[in-house]
Amino acid sequence: MNPRPALPRLAAFILLALAVAPLRSAQPTPPPPAPFTFAALGCMPYARIPEVDAAFARVIAEINRHAPAFTVHLGDTMASDEKATDALLMKRRADFDTFTTALVYTPGDNEWTDTHTEKAGRYVPTERLARIRLMYFAEERSLGQKPIPLITQRRDPAFSDYVENARWTHGGVVFATVHVVGSANNHSAAIPGAMDEWRARDAANAAWVRATFAAARETAAPGVALFFQAQPFQTDRNAAGYRAGFELFLKTVEAESRAFAKPVLLVHADEHRFRHEAGMRFEKNSAPLANVTRLETFGAADFHAVLVTVDPGSAQVFLAAPLIVPGNPLPLLPRPRAAKQ
């Protein structure tokens, strides 16, 4: 006797699958991560400023009042006429631990590249850099009272010395510090060993920028933010050493930002004046890159910060504004560019 054909059963299965398919496709798309804020500051505190300790304490208190997801200090934790002693470096580290959330730090030139001068203590700059790496970057996590885990360049065998270059993700957005400093990024033939140090770190920084954007592409990040101490965009400074010190970094950031094609925020310090420029020009006569925004913090005598709202679900992603600190003198907006200090 021939078995009965299975066609009715197969037809029933197909009809059931067709009925369930619309239900599966109708599942709502997960909402984007909730908006959050971060704060940034740099070039402070400088001891020559009157009532410096109280002014800096008010900055920290105001940032803590806003309770950002994290804060980034963009370097120059002392003035160029202060001696970068171990004691002062540890004092600044203790200051960082008074931030009630996470504090991420990237070094500035005043902490190490400029310490060879008499007024700064006649240190060997690379020795000071080694001490900073030991004091601040021994672990892959931020400072502050609620530290966050970090991915650092020490994981790359080719650049394992660069423990200060860090990356983290919040709300799907990728953030990274890059160790690029003022004073032409240590591109100075007059300082023994400076050029060798610059070449090695310059290559490491370019690799780190590329790795950061690769991570953003891999995770479909809605935006990328980079933090560094130097102000490298001064096209009116024609000194060959100055431009050479930043050339590879800028070309790498520009190329990666262009390929990424989503919002990129570049946050830096160095000139001590608030500046917010959407549509960044990487060269004086080049066309603006619409997806790149440049943000410069206050500093020196202006004891204030910046506060950035990050909305991963918006087209803009980053919205920055000054964070004016009550009790500290109001800044002049925009403050004229001062000589590098």
Image (cartoon, rainbow, N blue to C red):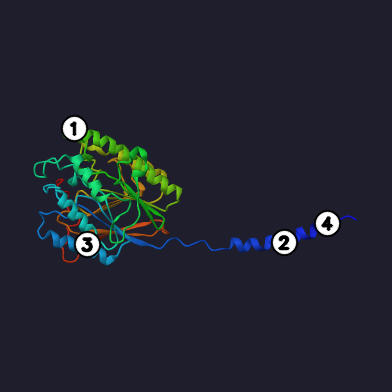
**Residue to which mark 1 is pinned:** 189
Question: Is residue 183 in sight in this rendering?
Answer: no
The structure residue drawn at horizontal position 80% and vertical position 57%, both measured from the top left corner, is 6
- Structural distance between the alpha carbons of marks 3 and 2: 64 Å
Question: Does 30 sit left or right of 277 as displayed?
Answer: right
Labels 3 and 4: the sequence-earlier one: 4
- Structural distance between the alpha carbons of marks 1 and 4: 88 Å
Labels 3 and 1: the sequence-earlier one: 3
Q: Where, by quadrant of the figure, is residue 104 drawn? A: bottom left
**Residue to which mark 2 is pinned:** 15
Residue 60 badge = 3
Question: Does 337 sit left or right of 40 as displayed?
Answer: left
Q: Considering the numbered disc 3 on the image, is that residue within a helix, a strand or a loop?
A: helix
Question: Is residue 9 in sight in this rendering?
Answer: yes
- Taking depth in this image into account, of 131 and 176 the one nearest to the observer is 131
Q: Which quadrant does the N terminus fall into?
A: bottom right
Labels 4 and 2: the sequence-earlier one: 4
**Residue to which mark 4 is pinned:** 5
Q: Position of residue 32 (x, y in %)?
A: 45, 60
The structure residue drawn at horizontal position 15% and vertical position 52%, both measured from the top left corner, is 88
- Structural distance between the alpha carbons of marks 3 and 4: 79 Å
Q: Where, by quadrant of the figure, is residue 117 drawn? A: top left
Residue 126 badge = none
- Structural distance between the alpha carbons of marks 3 and 1: 38 Å
